[in-house]
Image (cartoon, rainbow, N blue to C red):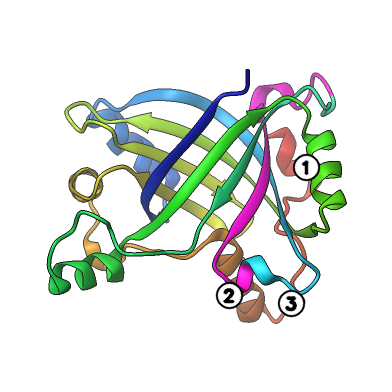
């Protein structure tokens, strides 16, 4: 049976100007690598009028492969993949008080998320197309996931992307705040943007026409 999950996702992003320095800090903090460096190819689907995006929703197929496997074999329909639905951003359901909710909303991205592991991403893409959805955006990254001792439930994900390097911290609000402080960040540095919006901002900055957020072929051999 496919593995499924439904939860309230709380996360932030942080810019990483120096990956080597970050890795040294993770080592000093005795961070544990819980997922090896993995390549992710993400494909978003939407209606012809982009109704999902306008409603703040997302449907995505993510294909995952260990980075070390790129030179050994081509991608196949048997690669590990995840089908994800995300709802629009909202306030944390158990955060009392208007002021508290406003503060949380300004710093954290909070969404309902449902995921299911799938074994045939190409077949799933056919199903989505048959339902009237089309490929709207592709982006890829290399991700390595860590855990910090003493910070339960916090995932620290180092993402190498075509528009720079970022951390994604996912967990409880208290866990995210503690992990960020240990890594040398303040709340003012939290980002809620998606990789799509970061990519569009980079295209505007460079005066480039947006397309898909993909690496040059040589990067996938690194």
Q: Which residue is mark 1?
A: 218
Q: Where 51 falls versus 168 (above or below)?
A: below
Choose the circle earlier in sequence order: 2 or 1.
2
Q: Earlier in the sequence, mark 1 or mark 3?
A: 3
Of tags 2 and 1, the one toward the viewer is: 2
The magenta stretch is: 53-73
Q: Which numbered tag is attached to residue 111? A: none
Name the side, left or right, on which 189 lies relative to 50: left
Furthest-front residue in view? 131
95 in relation to 197, above or below:
above
Q: Is residue 55 left or right of residue 60?
A: left
Residue 124 found in image quarter: top right
Q: How many numbered marks have been drawn onto this rendered protein structure?
A: 3
Q: Which residue is mark 3?
A: 208
In this rendered view, identify the residue nearer to me: 49 or 66: 49
Cβ–Cβ under 8 Å for marks 2 and 1? no
> Which quadrant of the view contains residue 28?
top left
């Amino acid at each position: 049976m496919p593995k499924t999950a439904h939860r309230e996702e709380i996360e932030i992003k942080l810019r990483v100007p120096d990956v080597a320095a970050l890795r040294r800090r993770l080592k000093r903090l005795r961070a544990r690598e819980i997922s090896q460096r993995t390549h992710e190819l993400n494909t978003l689907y939407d209606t012809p009028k982009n109704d999902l995006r306008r409603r703040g929703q997302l449907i995505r197929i993510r294909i995952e492969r260990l980075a070390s496997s790129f030179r050994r074999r081509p991608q196949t329909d048997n690669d590990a993949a995840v089908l994800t639905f995300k709802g629009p951003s909202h306030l944390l359901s158990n955060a009392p008080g208007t002021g508290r909710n406003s503060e949380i909303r300004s710093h954290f991205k909070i969404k309902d998320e449902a995921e299911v592991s799938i074994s045939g991403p190409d077949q799933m893409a056919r199903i989505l197309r048959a339902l009237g959805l089309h490929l709207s955006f592709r982006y890829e990254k290399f991700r390595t996931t860590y855990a910090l001792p003493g910070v339960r439930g916090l995932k620290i994900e180092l993402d190498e992307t075509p528009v720079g390097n970022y951390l994604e911290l996912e967990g409880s609000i208290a866990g995210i705040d503690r992990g960020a402080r240990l890594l040398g960040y303040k709340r003012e540095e939290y980002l809620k943007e998606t990789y799509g919006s970061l990519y569009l901002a980079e295209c505007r900055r460079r005066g480039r026409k947006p397309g898909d957020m993909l690496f040059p072929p040589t990067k996938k051999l690194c």
